[in-house]
Image: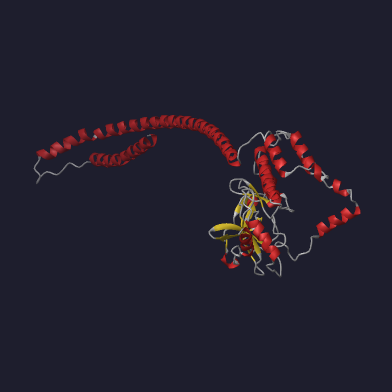
Amino acid sequence: WFKYQKQRMLWDESWIIDFRQIKHDQVARTTMGSIMSAPIANSDSNASRVTALSSCTAHANSRKQLFTHTGIYDGRTVAIKRIQTKTFSLSKTIRREVKQVRELDHPNLCKFFGGCVEVPNVAIITEYCPKGSLNDVLLNDEIPLNWGFRFSFATDIARGMSYLHQHRICHGRLKSLNCVLDDRWVCKITDYCLTIYRREDAAEPLSSYQMRLREVEDSSLECAWCPPLPELISGKADNTCPCPAEYVELIRRCRSHNPVHRPTFEQIRKFVYRINPNKVSPVDMMMNLMEKYSKHLEVLVAERTQDLMHEKQKTDRLLYTLKIQVSSSTFYLLEEIGGYLLQCRGMLQVKDPVKDPSTKLASRKPASSMSVLDTDRDREMERRERDRERYASIPGLLNHDLLLDSA
């Protein structure tokens, strides 16, 4: 029965996906990472874009390049690995590879969803991790990563590779570009297995051939190509390795030329876990960073609020000083206007004694026979009265406007 199930799994074609069923994502997906690992692709192809954080200038924010082809299949975003080949045959060897990959299930491995087998749309559909590759994140100076995150990434890689080796699977292409990060900052290994499936028509790159020629020329040159050990002690506390001696020793053991002296990935996982001082998940570390950021933000807001209150007090004192000066000038002007109005009122009262005799005289004489005494003095006084009434209204309006402005 078990043999029948294995044969059934081998010839099962439910993993085959029609390329037309994949909806190409029209929105350019941005991820936090650098633009170092962006492959060359056509400008009209659908792909996610790797950008830096939006804390730089607009020119830096506009630097976007293709990272991986994406699409929407079965309601979820998937990564599309295109295979550049003119001929493709679904052989029994490829079926064995697909069967082997479908049986793998680990949180540190990108899941295999299916593949397209029709030329020219031969592709491998896998899980999409929006944070980009490990190389993108590590080379981006705008993403602050302490050694807690770095130890977590190293532990995730060791777990994934240990799981592959337990199933007698050799990756063969392990590098930082094939280690991707999901939304929860979990490092996952991709591009494993499916060696025959991934084979393309393109020849080996010239740079790789040049390296092979140098190996033939000098077999001892391999030792000289080993990268130098990193500087693990930095001026900043977050960039300084908490255990540089143990970490350097682990690097030396891993790149030993004698395979017997190299540790297994299970040993590496235990060693990294032992030297890691922060044995917490990346989500918890992110929450701690957010808490520190919120506290720093609260302090910054309090300082800015205090500065604002000082500036407000200075502005209030300046406005109060200007108000006193304007009020003093207004009161002085009002005193002048008041004195002028009193003078006008006294001049208006002169009219009554002069006008009274004429009025009494006119009232005593008959209206039919007596005419009103009209002298030059009476006409002159009436004209002055009209002028005073007209000019007296102007200071009153000015006084009203000044009172409103001072209020």
Say if 281 sits above or below 181 in the image. above
Residue 184 position, x and y percent, is 59, 46
Residue 304 lies left or right of residue 360; in this view the side is right
- 107 or 375, nearer to the observer: 107
Residue 253 position, x and y percent, is 79, 40
Total marks placed: 0
Q: Quadrant of the C terminus?
A: top left
Q: Residue furthest right?
A: 217
- 393 or 290, nearer to the observer: 290
Say if 321 sits above or below 206 in the image. above
- 284 or 397, nearer to the observer: 284
Residue 91 lies left or right of residue 261; in this view the side is left
Q: How is the rendered protein coloured?
A: secondary structure
Q: Is residue 201 visible?
A: yes
Residue 83 position, x and y percent, is 69, 64
Residue 262 position, x and y percent, is 78, 43
Residue 184 lies left or right of residue 197; in this view the side is left
The residue drawn where x is 90% and y is 51% is 218
Q: Residue furthest front?
A: 1
Query: Which image quadrant for residue 144?
Result: top right
Q: Quadrant of the N terminus?
A: bottom right
Q: Is residue 231 visible?
A: no
